[in-house]
Amino acid sequence: SFLILTALAAALTLTGCEGVQGNAGALAFTNPLHIPPVLDPAPGPDGVKRFGLRLQEGTAELLPGKPTSTWGINGDYLGPTLRAKRGDRVAMAVTNSLNEASTLHWHGMRLPAAMDGGPHQMIQSGQTWSPEWTVDQPAATTWYHPHPHGQTARHVYRGLAGMFLIDDDVALPRTYGTDDIPLIIQDKKFTPDGRLDEKSGGTFGILGDQILVNGTYDPFFQVTSQRVRFRVLNGSNAHVYNIGFADDRTFHVVAGDGGLLEKPVAAQRFRISPGERVEFVAGFQPGEQALLKSFEGDSDVESGDFDLIKFTAAGQLTPSPELPTKLASPTPASQPTKTRTFKLGGSNINGRDMDMTRVDEVVAAGAHEIWELNNTTFAHNFHIHEVAFRVLDIDGEAPPEYMRGPKDTVFVPGKTKVRLAVEFGRHTDPKTPYMYHCHILKHEDQGMMGQFVIVKPGTEDSTSRTLPMTG
Ligand code: C2O
Ligand code: CU
Ligand code: CU
């Protein structure tokens, strides 16, 4: 009987391996897409919405038949989708049940620096961190993930991430899980026995050869309405994707990182780098199948040809409202008062590595500035905490139309200049910094990150450039 068991185990291993090979070629699309559960608590008598989140260890069957040790938030892998509206008061209780310290950063959220969850707000093992703020920004797909300095790549890769939706009131599909679908795209590398391979030898760190969508390997989704809104988050450590349908059908991009575009933009492809979000609405015919893919790009941080997910449309589809012709009002032209330049080196910014005790930039509350990114090396991207920015130009040329909404993260191809028009918030705190950094997580961990504080206008020069060590 031992022999039979061994043979059985060998057969199982073989099947597993074929599954592993499958992702780059023909997938079977056998697994229903996991839809992260929603956490949308009713406000308490004090009007505050209270969310409980726990960082924990888990086991998830990421590859069929192969349990993998993972980390998750309120579950084994990834976390719940949080929801709130502009004006809501939200209070978080983030408990760290891991055996090491971490943080939880609200990427895309505009809030006081002490609530931001960056490397200065460490949560020790066994502790609970309780930030609280009022949501005060346009509707958007934001997200959350750990940010412990030097450890972010590993913590995110193991599965700590989730979406935080700020709801809108325009006529877009909005039934979560039915016609409003999160797509968290992450690449992974597995060891032959099914563990997450965390070795990150190369320039960009982990570049996996397997793709998970919402933690589901080889996924399909059953479409039941004529139009579906997809909220794509690139939650990968490094890979950049060029997303579109295998049949090149046209869809409409409706939002970027920081919220809605002025109007829907017809597109067949969009590029999305780690940390960015793109929302698009696609139409389906009854009974059809459609394959969403990432197409080969031209830089070595872009994915090869990957199948992402298959959509199968039901024989009868629920009618959807027409796409609105207008989504958001145009942003008034701003008068930038200052230009700052950032030279992106191999793993540093302006020749300096991240230093937790150094304030790199001091910004006046409510300022409008130009940030000029000059990438002198290979591909990077750039994320700024707290702000909303517009991409002015990429090597002097206007960005593609789908990139013209409010953003907080932008891809910066190798040897390229990107100019941003950045609008800063009004929460001042001269002693607690926000971060800006490359969101290719290996680069961030290597020190490709800087710190800025927001202060009362007129106090920039008297603001201290050094901070006490924390964390
Ligand atoms: Cu999504 Cu500073 O990070
Ligand atoms: Cu962020
Ligand atoms: Cu980088």
Image (cartoon, rainbow, N blue to C red):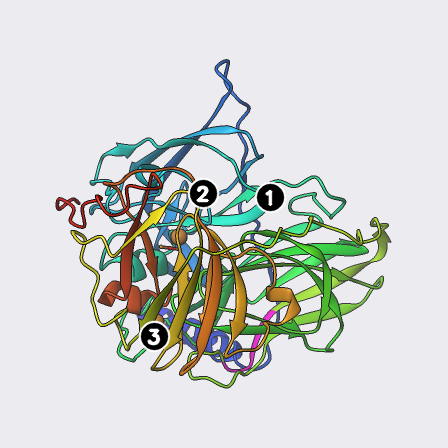
The residue type indicated by label 2 comes to Arg
Can residue 166 be seen here?
yes
The residue type indicated by label 1 comes to Ala
Q: Which residue is mark 3?
A: 192
| Percent position of residue 363, x then y | 34, 49
Q: Mark 1 or mark 2, which has the lower sequence index? A: 2
Regarding mark 3 in the picture, which secondary structure is present there? loop
- 368 over 340 or under it: above or below: above
Residue at point 54%, 56% (across, down): 257
Please tell me in which quarter of the rendered image ligand 3 is found.
bottom left
Q: Which mark is residue 139?
A: 1
| Percent position of residue 382, x then y | 40, 65
Q: Which residue is mark 2?
A: 110
Lateral position of residue 112 relative to residue 310, left or right: left
Regarding mark 1 in the picture, which secondary structure is present there? loop
The residue type indicated by label 3 comes to Pro
Q: Which mark is residue 130?
A: none
Q: Nearer the viewer, residue 235 or 329?
A: 329
Q: Quadrant of the N terminus?
A: bottom left
Lateral position of residue 29 relative to residue 69, left or right: right
Magenta segment boundaries in residue numbering: 304-308
Residue at point 52%, 54% (across, down): 335
